[in-house]
């Protein structure tokens, strides 16, 4: 493990005798709280008022007043993982950022910058760096995972031997290729006994590094973990809100990437504000519709991880998925666009996964299906867009006006109208065949 300053070898930034001699149970405060929750049989169930919650409430003030007690590991040296690790270190937490490449770690120690993903931003002096996965993960309170979705399961398998009570928080937005597994599903598969959470929101890393006011959501069924993440990352410029709807928060972060690609494509055609507003609102309807089928609370999509992240990602050229969409709209194929981007754009895989899932389960996702047709079936974007505008009727706001009922009513009306027309045509044809005189009369009436 490497550090730009020797003092970083000590836990936190306070090297007073009092802190160095503090009881071990204080250094493992979060682990102790979670252990009490586990012994109480609470596990991943929603916490109810109990002695455990009382203990949590009693200790939260202590965590907030001295966050150096929290020992954190961030796995993944991309832009967002680096920004969050830097924020935690700046808050005084004992924070280590793990990067796979040893040479990259040496460069970060020397320059205190992440030249590839966040060039020009000096990282906090107290942030430590490592390429040793075991040393990074051991004896930590929380392990934040910020690797691309394709590497998420492999990373969990790699750290499994070193997990002895740590909590896991996913910073990765997306779905596993070919399995439709969200990151929380993968955590449950590979580390079934751990407390875990997911974090999502309108969090463009460069803006966070510039101290532009931002906010995120930590979702977990473990209340102690939610509080601990808030204590570690909450600051004057970065607010951390809480939720217990893990599925909804995670789906918001994954699905919005689809519509960022759509908005990027629309921008390439220089569309107006009406079109942008239509895409955003119909995207939100698709997200909430899909989320409810997956067991999420539709109201979650009205929060930061839903409409908040959707707006930020669909309106900023800092978004990787938006840039991919812009390149596609200008006629570049998907392989060339991904190569030019040089980073992971999770939305490309998510489009394929959601298209297949929605088709299989009968979920109405017209924008997603349209993007799939453009990217994977080589359909003309303009033709697909025109077809979307001609698509059937829907209720405006999902889950306010029961769209199933409204759509069923519209369908019934249309069928009735069609049947009436068909019956009328049949009668007219019959009359034509049996009575030429009547046929002339009908023609005159027309």
Image (cartoon, helix red, strand yellow):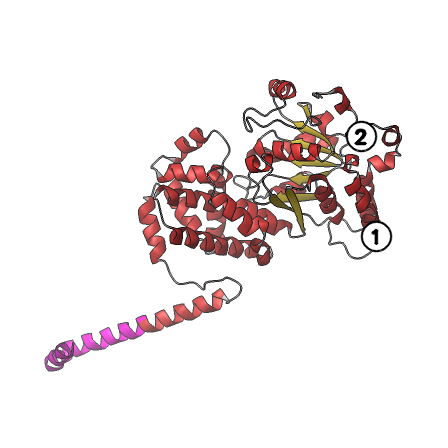
Out of 24 and 125, give the one closest to the viewer.
Answer: 125
* Most foreground residue, 426 or 141: 141
Q: Which residue is mark 2?
A: 14
Q: Residue at x 45, y 68 (%)?
A: 406
Q: State the residue at coordinates (36%, 50%).
A: 272
User: Residue 197: horizontal and vertical position, in percent?
Assistant: 67, 44
Which of the image's four quarters has the N terminus?
top right
Q: Is residue 195 visible?
A: no
Q: Is residue 129 left or right of residue 63?
A: left
Q: Label 2: how many residues lie within 10 Å, few (<14), some (14-19) or many (20+)?
A: some
Q: Is residue 410 left or right of residue 100?
A: left
Q: Which mark is residue 191?
A: none
Q: Main secondary structure of the magenta part?
A: helix
For label 1, the residue is: 54
Q: Nearer the viewer, residue 346 or 210?
A: 210
Q: Which residues are magenta?
A: 418-446
Q: Quadrant of the C terminus?
A: bottom left
Between discs 1 and 2, the one toward the N terminus: 2
Q: Is residue 217 magenta?
A: no
Helix, strand or loop at label 2? It is loop
Q: Nearer the viewer, mark 1 or mark 2?
A: 2
Residue 436 within the magenta-colored segment of the rendering: yes
């Amino acid at each position: 493990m490497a550090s730009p300053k020797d003092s970083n070898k000590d836990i936190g930034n306070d090297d007073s005798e009092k802190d160095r001699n503090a009881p071990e149970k204080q250094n493992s405060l979060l682990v102790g709280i979670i252990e009490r929750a586990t012994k109480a049989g609470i596990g991943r169930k929603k916490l109810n008022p109990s002695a455990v919650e009382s203990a949590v409430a009693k200790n939260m003030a202590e965590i907030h007043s001295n966050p150096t007690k929290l020992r954190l590991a961030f796995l993944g040296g991309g832009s967002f993982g680096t920004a969050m690790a830097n924020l935690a270190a700046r808050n005084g937490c004992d924070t280590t950022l793990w990067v796979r490449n040893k040479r990259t770690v040496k460069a970060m120690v020397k320059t205190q910058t992440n030249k590839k993903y966040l060039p020009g931003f000096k990282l906090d002096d107290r942030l430590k760096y490592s390429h040793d996965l075991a040393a990074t993960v051991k004896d930590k309170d929380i392990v934040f995972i910020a690797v691309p979705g394709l590497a998420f399961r492999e990373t969990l398998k790699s750290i499994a031997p070193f997990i002895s009570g740590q909590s896991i928080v996913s910073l990765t937005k997306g779905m596993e290729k070919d399995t439709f597994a969200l990151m929380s599903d993968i955590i449950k598969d590979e580390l079934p006994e751990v407390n875990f959470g997911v974090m999502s929101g309108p969090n463009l890393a460069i803006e966070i590094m510039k101290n532009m006011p931002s906010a995120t959501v930590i979702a977990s069924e473990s209340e102690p973990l939610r509080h601990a993440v808030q204590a570690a990352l909450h600051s004057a410029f970065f607010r951390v809100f809480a939720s217990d709807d893990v599925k909804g928060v995670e789906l918001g972060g994954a699905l919005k990437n689809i519509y960022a690609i759509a908005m990027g494509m629309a921008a390439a055609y220089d569309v107006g504000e009406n079109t942008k507003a239509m895409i955003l609102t119909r995207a939100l309807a698709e997200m909430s519709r899909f989320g409810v089928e997956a067991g999420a609370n539709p109201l979650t999509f009205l929060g930061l991880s839903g409409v908040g992240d959707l707006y930020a990602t669909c309106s900023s050229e800092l978004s990787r998925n938006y840039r991919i969409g812009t390149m596609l709209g200008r006629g570049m194929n998907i392989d060339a666009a991904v190569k030019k981007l040089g980073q992971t754009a999770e939305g490309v895989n998510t489009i394929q996964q959601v298209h297949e899932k929605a088709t299989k389960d009968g979920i109405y996702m017209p924008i997603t299906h349209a993007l799939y047709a453009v990217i994977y079936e080589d359909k003309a974007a303009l033709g697909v867009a025109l077809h979307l505008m001609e698509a059937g009727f829907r209720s405006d706001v999902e889950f306010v006006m029961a769209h199933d009922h409204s759509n069923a009513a519209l369908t019934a009306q249309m069928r009735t109208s069609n049947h009436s027309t068909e019956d009328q045509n049949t009668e007219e044809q019959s009359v034509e065949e049996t009575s030429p005189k009547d046929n002339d009369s009908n023609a005159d009436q027309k």
